[in-house]
């Protein structure tokens, strides 16, 4: 993970489009990878003046947008292969524009795969319900509310994967 982050940061600083960054990092990881090592990545470059995000999804969970008008929407985009799995493949670039007041919510698979005592996953459906209930809140309240709901759902079940969110 740390190597991937360093490679993405160093490559991204060259100012290249998101898909080219992912292609370059993928090839470097494949060259140096230990068998069965891969990483999922949602990589984007946000233009604070226009609200546009140039992004590439390399096998990661699709984020959600909590729109200022109250809609909650999954980000529709091409989902590319994870990084480090297969050298020389092309990655597709996507774009979206956030409006003033929109919140982009990104999360790791540990969120949706959190288990309860009956070994049932939290899931995207429940996460979407919770996001809809929090859609008029600020980003800190959204993330805290989502984490609280995940913890309540899991109860005493031990966490087996990271639960990471960004809003």
Image (cartoon, rainbow, N blue to C red):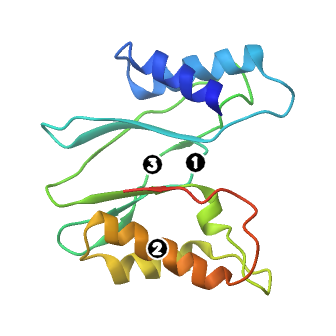
Q: Split into 4 quadrants, where in the image is the N terminus?
A: top right
Q: What residue is rendered at 64% in x and 37% in y?
A: 81
- Tell me the quarter of the picture where residue 47 sits: top left
Secondary structure of residue under mark 1? loop
Q: Quick check: can you spot residue 88?
A: no
Disc 3/disc 1 C-alpha distance (Å): 11 Å
Question: Which of the two labelled residues, at mark 3 and mark 2, occupies the earlier sequence position?
Answer: 3
In front of the other: 127 or 62: 127
- In the rendered image, residue 96, in percent from the top left (x then y), is placed at 29, 46
For mark 2, give the secondary structure.
Answer: helix
Position of residue 75 relative to residue 52, above or below, is below
Rendering coords of residue 144 (x, y %):
42, 71
Residue occupied by mark 1: 60
How crowded pointer 1 is (Cα within 10 Å; few <14, some 14-19, many 20+) is rated as many
Asked whether residue 161 appears in the rendered view, the answer is: yes
Q: Nearer the viewer, residue 99 or 136?
A: 136
* Residue 120 location, quadrant: bottom right
For the point 56% across and 54% down, the residue is 61
Reading the image, the residue beneath label 3 is 77
As drawn, the residue found furthest toward the right would be 35
Q: CA distance from mark 3 to mark 2?
A: 23 Å
Q: Label 2 belongs to which residue?
A: 146
Q: Nearer the viewer, residue 46 or 92?
A: 46
Q: Residues within 10 Å of mark 3 (few under 14, many from 20)?
A: some
Which dot marks residue 107?
Answer: none
Classify residue 153 as left or right of residue 42: right
Q: Is residue 18 left or right of residue 109?
A: left
- Locate residue 2: give its quadrant: top right
């Amino acid at each position: 993970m740390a190597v991937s982050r360093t490679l993405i940061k160093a490559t991204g600083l060259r100012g290249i489009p998101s898909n080219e960054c992912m292609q370059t990092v993928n090839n470097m990881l494949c060259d140096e990878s230990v068998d069965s090592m891969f990483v999922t990545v949602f990589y984007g470059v946000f233009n604070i003046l226009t609200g546009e995000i140039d992004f590439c999804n390399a096998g990661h969970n699709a984020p959600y947008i909590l729109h200022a008008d109250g809609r909650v929407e999954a980000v529709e985009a091409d989902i590319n292969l994870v990084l480090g799995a297969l050298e020389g493949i092309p990655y597709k670039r996507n774009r979206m524009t956030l409006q003033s007041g929109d919140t982009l919510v990104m999360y790791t698979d540990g969120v949706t795969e959190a288990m309860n005592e009956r070994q049932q996953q939290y899931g995207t459906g429940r996460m979407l319900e919770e996001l809809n209930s929090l859609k008029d809140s600020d980003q800190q309240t959204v993330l805290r509310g989502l984490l609280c709901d995940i913890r309540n759902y899991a109860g005493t079940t031990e966490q087996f994967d990271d639960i990471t969110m960004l809003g």
